[in-house]
Each structure stands twice: as C-alpha cells, then as structure tokens.
Amino acid sequence: MQEKILDLRQPLTKAEEGGTAPAAFSVKDLRLTFANGHEIKYPDIQVKPGEKVLLTGANGTGKSTLFKLLVGEAAASGGQISFFDQAGKKVKPDRTKIGYLPQQAVLLPSSVMNNITMFDPELESKAKASAADAQLSEAVDSWPQGLETPVDLAGDNLSGGQKQKVVLARAEVRDSQLLLVDEGTSAIDQAAGRKILDKLLQSKQTVVLIAHNLTKEERDLFDREVALRA
Ligand SMILES: Nc1ncnc2c1ncn2[C@@H]1O[C@H](COP(=O)(O)OP(=O)(O)OP(=O)(O)O)[C@@H](O)[C@H]1O
Ligand SMILES: [Mg+2]
C-alpha cells in the first residue's frame, strides 16, 4: 500500500459544522511522512484544559508541523489526534475555533484594526484591549490614525516586533479556549515579551507555546515542557 504523504491544505475558514471549540488535545502514535521520505514520529502528548505547555526541540524536530496537524493544515500519515472540551470530554472539534499563531504569520494590506479583527465587526470593541495585552498600545497611541493606521506591506511602516504584536492581538481577540503560539514573541524585545508571556500564562486558556529564546526563569513559568527530538 502506498504511504500517505504530507497533504498541505488550505487553512480552514468555515466553521466545522456540529463541532465544538476544543480546549485540550492528545496525540497518540502520530507520524507524518513527507514526499521526500523524511518522517516525523511524535511522542504521545496529552494537554489538559487550562494547561500551559512549552514546546521545545531543535530546528526541524516538527514543532510547527505539530500545530499544522492540530489545526488541520496538514494531514497525518498515521496515529490519532483527539480533542476535548473544557470538562475533559472527548468532542468532535471545530478546529477553526483553535487560536493559532503560525511561525510565518501574514499581515493583510488593511488597517491594524482589520488585521486584528480579521474583518469581524463584532470583535472591534475588544481590539483595543487585545492590542494592549500584546503590548502594542504605545505604538498605537503614537500613530495619528491609531488602530485605523494602514499596514503598508511595501513601505514597511511597522517594525518586525510591531507586526508580531498585531498578530498576537489577532489571536488574543478571539478568546479561544486553546491557543497555539509558534514563536510569537521572537522579534519582540525582552521586556514586552515577558509581559506578553505573563498575560498568556495568567489566562484561563490552554496555551501551547513554541519558543527558543526563553530564560530559565521564563521556562519555569509553564506547567511543563514537552521536548521533541529528531
Ligand atoms: N512541506 C514540507 N515538505 C517537506 N518537508 C517538510 C515540509 N514541512 C516541513 N518539513 C520538514 O519537516 C521537519 C519539521 O519541520 P518543522 O517546521 O515542523 O520544524 P520545527 O521544529 O518547527 O523547526 P524550527 O525550530 O526551525 O521552526 C523539517 O525537517 C522540515 O524540513
Ligand atoms: Mg517551526
């Protein structure tokens, strides 16, 4: 039988009908074979509702790919992924309700506001608070148009760290029960990064964060660390 290879899908945009917002997950015997034959085998992982987990491992060990498998952007070659609600009951997931910050997050040529709300007008009232949580307030206050400042992709009017903060605010504003953050603070200065980390770790959300550059003290703030190996 032919081995199934990585199937890179479009991000899910439509809610998965009849599905529940996942708060936790587990993976068992999960593996993925790429077209070039390279295989990633994951250890069995269980993340409980509300847990704060640091996901580490050297470059190429499959951290980002694990998030893609969880949100449905990639398909596994074998094994199981299960999702659970806040009470720990197994559910059929609506994976569009997972908060996901990809390693290469994309900004759109529109206002900072629209980049945070992703054009959902119901989220506009919360955008300011989310921007504050992402340590973006100082920058927003300094822009004459505030949150209505256009993101000029060609002109690069936002710094790398400011762009990451916009994307963090985008994840924050949806209030998802499960948040997957792939190196979301790598371009953000130490002081702001620490504040963002504190906010994430004080929240009720289940948080899995991939980071390379945390201090020992910062790592100790998590409930536990899951280390992937090649
Ligand atoms: N679409 C793909 N096709 C082929 N190989 C891929 C693909 N995506 C990822 N890989 C390979 O899978 C492995 C895991 O990649 P992944 O991006 O998950 O690593 P990572 O742990 O997030 O690394 P980093 O710390 O550098 O971000 C790497 O060896 C990578 O080359
Ligand atoms: Mg990665």
Image (spheres, rainbow, N blue to C red):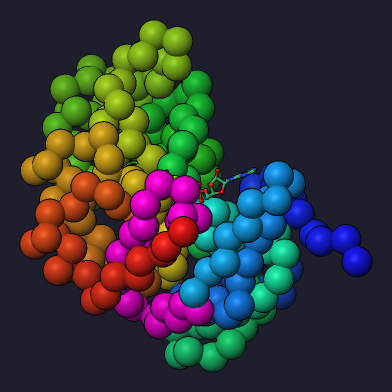
Count of numbered circles in the view: 0
Measuring 42% from the left and 26% from the top, which residue is drawn there? Answer: 111
Q: Position of residue 123 (x, y in %)?
A: 44, 49
Of residues 82 and 171, the one nearer the viewer is: 82
Position above or below: 215 against 156: below
Position above or below: 137 against 94: above
Of residues 61 and 118, the one nearer the viewer is: 61
Would residue 37 be found to the left or right of residue 175 on screen?
right
Of residues 43 and 27, the one nearer the viewer is: 43
Position above or below: 42 against 74: below
- Residue 47 visible here: yes
Q: Position of residue 51 (x, y in %)?
A: 32, 77
- Assess whether residue 51 is covered by the magenta stretch: yes
Of residues 127 and 136, the one nearer the viewer is: 136
Measuring 71% from the left and 71% from the top, which residue is drawn there? Answer: 78
The residue positioned farthest toward the right in the image shown: 1
The residue positioned farthest toward the top in the image shown: 155
Would residue 132 be found to the left or right of residue 24 on screen?
left
- Residue 71 visible here: no
Name which quarter of the figure residue 149 lies in: top left
Would residue 110 be found to the left or right of residue 204 on screen?
right
Q: Position of residue 99 (x, y in %)?
A: 46, 58
Measuring 49% from the left and 33% from the top, which residue is drawn there? Answer: 106
- Assess whether residue 157 is covered by the magenta stretch: no
Q: Name the image quarter holding the N terminus.
A: bottom right
Measuring 55% from the left and 76% from the top, which residue is drawn there? Answer: 27
Q: Position of residue 184 (x, y in %)?
A: 33, 46
Name which quarter of the figure residue 206 lies in: bottom left
Q: Which residues are magenta?
A: 44-63
